[in-house]
Structure formats: structure tokens, C-alpha cells
Image (cartoon, rainbow, N blue to C red):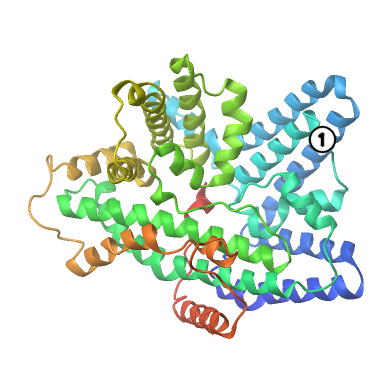
Amino acid sequence: MLFNSYEFLVLYLPLTVLLFYALLRVVGRQLALAWLVLASLAFYGWWEPHHLWLIGLSLLGNYGCSHLIVRWPRGGRYWLAIGIGFNLALLGYYKYTHFLLASLAQVFDLQFSLPEVLLPLAISFFTFQQIGFLVDCQRGQARPPNVLHYLLFVTFFPQLIAGPIVQHRQVMTQFQNLSRKVPWESVAQGLTLFSLGLFKKVLIADKLAEWSALAFDLAAAGQPIAMADAWGGTLAYTFQLYFDFSGYSDMALGLAALFGIRLPRNFDSPYQAKSIGELWNRWHITLSHFLRDYLFLPLGGSHRRRPVMTSRNLLITMTLCGCWHGAGWTFLLFGALQGLLMSLHHYWRLHLRSRFAWRMPGFLAWALTFGSFAMTLVLFRASTLMAAGRMYQALVGWDTVLGGATLIGASQWLRILLMFPLVLYVPNAVRFVYGEHPVWHWRPRPAYAVLTVAMMTWCLLRLNENSEFLYFHF
């Protein structure tokens, strides 16, 4: 079930919210939360019901392991290793088996039939979330809650499929302290955020997807691409990914707010960043924090006097980040390039900038950050390394079609370029709704209610075909 589908918007969401508040007011918190768990599992099982056993196995294994870690602290590291191994085994089998076997067959020229392993939705997200919980239990920062609260902590449907990756301390007390009164202001904020996110997805990201596909599909087919089309397709995908994930993040926070739950923000205008490190601190914020707290810092973190060690830790962390996004050489290389860019920026900031006593102008820093990230996204979008190579050749005008664009016309180019002022100057949706923007502040007023209804209606009229969010594939 998709957030941007009629069955979700017209049937699932109203039924889930209304029955939740009815149970909360009439019966009590526990039964209302139990209904929310059942509704979340139904949401997850909508695509592939037989994968419910997998998430059930993951929940059971991790919940049991968390109790063993807390009950026998002397063997905490042992049980933590078992728990992490259990999670990585599930993730590795379902996400990387086909890729590893195909790579071995290609390298060693082996002939064997590859197993068909269907990737379960959200396995990367609920795996990382539970690994973080086990580590916190071993560190003494968390204790296993009751079964109901743990199930909801992992399966809460607004964040289950594509994040944010939630830490226990960010939501557990909210589940435990829900009031029986309907939080009307939170509901109004949630509807506004959800409408803004749906607008980004349906009316911006999905249209950009059509234009980016024109160039990347041609590259995948081995056909020549005009230089202008390659640039148009690359920029279209750069903004498509932005608005797709930004829209999903707004919708996830908005849906949680309908139940009086405030999830951690996961997206904060990253294309305004002036360094690659700042960009990743604004893009998929909870994933970046997870990698920092549970991988980069345990590896040794940043070394001011040993830049080689810092570069090593950054390369390992970001390469694994690339692998987390997908099983393929394109994702691995994408992550490695992010680590390389972060290493270069770190060395520049701590060593070269002070030596030359020169501060890079803000516009140049932004242009280098945005340009380098957009170029690496070619790997993120391309289906194969060969397709990525053809796109890079077209971008520099090497061995490709000369002349003007043949696929992306002037009107499409104009709309792609209009994305720059949108991402750079339009107020961030979350900051706007929660009153954190210095100028624009949301208020529960009739004008904002009319605007929310208008956006929702416009989007409903444009739901001609459902398109998945890009992060559903990761």
C-alpha cells in the first residue's frame, strides 16, 4: 500500500485514525496501541503477505536478544554479537545473495542457476533500527519495553517502510504517555505536512521522473545520448530524488502527528548545504546519525593529527552506506565516492584552509557541493556501470550525439531549472509547520485549512497511476 494511493487515502488512513481514537477514548491506551500494531502489520503485508513471517521472526529474535543482553550483562557483548549476526544474516540473504552469486559467476566464469530471492520491503530500515536498539541495550542506554510497545516501536506504519530510522528514546515515552484527548493541533499540523509531502511527490517528483527516465533508459539500452539530454536527465533525477524523499519524509512525519506522535525529522533542505558533510547531515538525517553513532565513531571517528585514519573511517562508513542503499556495483561505487568527497573536504577544512588562509566563497562552496553530488547520483540512478559510463560520456560530450536536446525540450528544461529556486529559497516544510522558520509560521487558521484541502484535492485528481517512493527499493 502506498501513501499516494486511493486505497490508503480513502480507506486505510481514515479507518485507522478514527478507530484508534475511538478505542483510545472509550477503552484505553493499550487496546488503541494494539490496534495500531495490527493496522501497521496489515499495511506491511499489503504487498506480500507471506513476508509477515519474516518481520515476525525479526521482531521475535531481536526482542528476545535484548532481554538476554540486559539480564546477563557480563555476556552482553556475546549476545549483542549474536543479535547483530542474526540481523545481518537476514539482511544479507535477502538483499545481497543474488548480487554476490552473480558477481562470483561473472568473475570466475561459473555456470549455475541463481536463486530467485524477492527483497522484502523495509528490511534495511527495520534491521538497522533494531540493531541500534540492541547496541543501546548493551551500552545501558535502553531496556526492553513491554511487547506491545516494542512491536509498535518497530512496525509503526508511518516510518516502517522508508524511515526515519527511529531510536527508542525518541518515541517510546510518547507511546507510553499518550493522552485520551485528541491532540487537534498535532492533527492539523499532520494534515498540513502530509498534504505538502503528497504535493511534492505527485506533482513534482513524478513529473521529473518521466524526464530523467528518458536519458537513463537510453543509456541502459546502449543508445547514443545528446549532451543536453544527459545534463537534463541528470538534473531531473537530482531533483526527482530530492522531492521524492522530501515528500515521503514530510508525509511520514505528518502521518505520525495524526496520532499525536512526533517522529525525528529526516530531511532538512540538503541542497542548501555548502559541504558534502553538511549535505549528508541534512539528507536522510536518521541514517546519517545511525552510521555516525554505530559505525564511524566505533571505528575511531575523526583524527585531527591522523587524516589517513579519518579518511579510512569515512570511506568504510560511506561505502557501507552505499551498499545499504542497494546490492550492486553502482551503489558500492556511489558510497565510496561519497566517502572520498568527505575525506577531501575534511582534509581541506582542517589542514589546507588554515595553511593558505583562504576561505572559499559561499556560492563556490555550494556549487562544488551540489555539482559533485549530482554527478555521483548518475551511479545511484544508472542500472549498470556500463549505463553510468555512457551517461558520463554524454555529460562531457565524448562519443555521443552532438547538437541540441532531442528528448528534453525547452519547456521541460525551464521547469527543471525552476527547481533551483524551490530547493534554495522556499521555506522548509517541517520548519514552516512547526514554527521554526524565521519569517513563515504555520498557524491553525482557516486560510491554511483551505490551502491544505486544495493541495489534497489537486493531488487526488492527479493520482492517475501509483508510483512507488524511490526509497522503497532500498
Q: Residue 76 is drawn in which quadrant?
A: top right
Locate residue 398 relative to residue 369 in the image: left or right: left
Residue 217 in view: no
Residue at (64%, 32%) from the top-left corner? 88
Q: Position of residue 453 (x, y in %)?
A: 54, 82
Q: Position of residue 384 (x, y in %)?
A: 34, 40
Q: Judge by depth and name the residue closer to the eye, 94 or 289.
A: 289
Q: Position of residue 148 (x, y in %)?
A: 85, 53
Quarter in which the N terminus is drawn: bottom right
Residue 222 in view: yes
Residue at (35%, 52%) from the top-left corner? 238
Q: Judge by depth and name the residue closer to the eye, 186 or 329.
A: 186
Q: Residue 419 is drawn in which quadrant?
A: bottom left
Q: Position of residue 209 (x, y in %)?
A: 36, 60
Residue at (8%, 50%) from the top-left corner? 402
Q: Residues within 10 Å of mark 1 (few under 14, many from 20)?
A: many
Q: Residue 187 is drawn in which quadrant?
A: bottom right
Instruction: Name which residue type carries label 1.
Output: Ser
Q: Judge by depth and name the residue closer to the eye, 106 or 356.
A: 356
Residue at (51%, 51%) from the top-left corner? 471
Locate residue 41 relative to residue 330 in the image: left or right: right
Q: Which residue is mark 1?
A: 66
